Image (cartoon, rainbow, N blue to C red):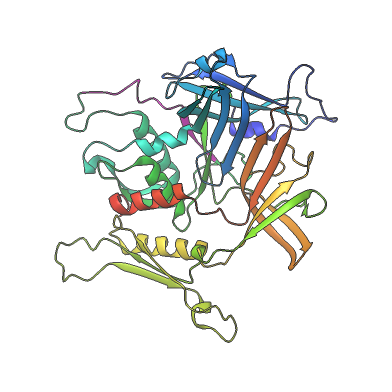
Amino acid sequence: MTATDTLEPPRAASTPIPAGRGRYRLVVYPRQFSTALPTPAGELNTARGRRLDQKYDTVDELTFTLDGHDPAAGLVTELATDVILWRWNETTGRDVALFRGLVDHAEDQVSEQSATVTFTAHDYSALLGRRVTTGSIGSNTWTQVDQDNLVVYLLNRATAQMTNADGSVSFNPGAYLPLAAVWVNPDGTNRGLSGVLRDRAYAPGTVIGNAIDDLAKVQGGFDYDVLPAGGQTSSDSVRIFYPQQGVTRTDMVLVYGANVASVTRTVASGDYANYVRVIGNKGSADPNAAQLFSERWNTDANNVTVTPVGLWQNVENASDVSVQATLDQKAAGDLAYQGVLTPTYTLGLRPGTYTYGNPNMGDSVPLIINEGRLAVNTTVRVVGITYDIGDDGQEDITLTVGRPPVTLARLLAAGDRNIDQLARR
């Protein structure tokens, strides 16, 4: 599937789910180590507890459970099996691949009464967090290179792995990842280069997944996701959205009491800062040398007569940055994100509300809530979609809108970046 496949014109009438099957299909494949098209090994019709979590700029996660005695459980091997979750699209009259990923976790629970196994799979961008750059620092240094091409370079480095000492040992085909960069506009259509030029130096041992995410998060960066190919091509598309993912929708409104059945609203001070200080790398072993830093703040940090929130500070470590302009971009990007106190809404949609692509991740949609103390009439951005698939084929769709919640995985990833960042200049 290419980035433009999602824009196929709708049919005039809805096409019902074919007889004898459910809305969702879960198919297993042997893991790929080449560009050959994958061949299915079987279908997991007896899987229960299927749940797909998709979040903005984050790895997608699929979980499902099988009876340990079921022959289908033998089709799944940790680290060696891919799964594709298909959903019937009534608008286009065909299955759409919502997810393709590698099964990387399994938990067997055995008792005298039963044996069950719960599998977890993540899309292939998760493996970018387990790939590092090798080679000398000079071979990983780039000056005034378009950020789109830097992503292509990093993806290529993730796949073309060899020993660092002399490059005499190659880890191919074991290092193969079915990922290819695609540059797209906010609506998913193809585009040319962003025109945003960056200077970067990726030292040996730089975690490639972190390097891509760091590149995305600076001022003038981008959004990204993985669009599964569904077996139609050998590689899934790592879509690089510039300047951001998603469009403003005027064709739908989310209304509590109508198409929204439940609402959870969360406001967390930990997500907010109106002053950001970013510490860089001063490039000197002299403890008396001046510290390299950048600071940015909003007017509400000390404007208590108009906005009585006071000062909320946050300090971040960017030990890989040794150029002031890059550090300034980092600080500005952090403040743009953290400097707005944005509620997060978790919206449970009524059955039949959701159709594929309505909405898409990143889309901005109107939200109306008039209940209790909430009198909300605003526009929010879709930053998460959860598919809970019932054992009888029914689906419960939950949207997260506003700001992505801070998860433990994100906190741990941030710690890793603070420890071994040696990439930006």
Task: Give left or right: position of 138 versus 179.
Answer: left
Q: Is residue 112 above or below residue 129?
A: above
Residue 192 position in % (x across, y down) = 53, 42
Residue 287 position in % (x across, y down) = 16, 68
Q: Quadrant of residue 44?
A: top right
Q: Is residue 256 above or below residue 126?
A: below
Residue 274 position in % (x across, y down) = 49, 72
Counting labels gives 0
Q: Residue furthest left?
A: 286
Task: Give left or right: position of 401 versus 105.
Answer: right
The image quadrant where one finds the C terminus is bottom left
Q: Residue furthest right?
A: 13
Residue 331 position in % (x across, y down) = 41, 64
Dominant SS of magenta comes to: loop
Visible residue check, residue 109: yes
- Residue drawn at (55%, 47%), measured in percent from left and top? 56
Q: Is residue 143 above or below residue 20?
A: below
Q: Is residue 176 magenta?
A: yes
- Residue drawn at (55%, 19%), measured in percent from left and top? 28
- Pick whichever, 156 or 271, lies toward us: 271
Visible residue check, residue 227: no
Q: Is residue 97 magenta?
A: no
- Residue drawn at (39%, 71%), measured in percent from left and top? 295
- Residue drawn at (26%, 45%), measured in percent from left and top? 203
The image quadrant where one finds the N terminus is top right
Task: Give left or right: position of 290 versus 230.
Answer: left
- Pick whichever, 418 or 296, lies toward us: 418
Q: Residue furthest front?
A: 112
Q: Please state the extent of the stretch shown in magenta in the rendering.
A: 169-183
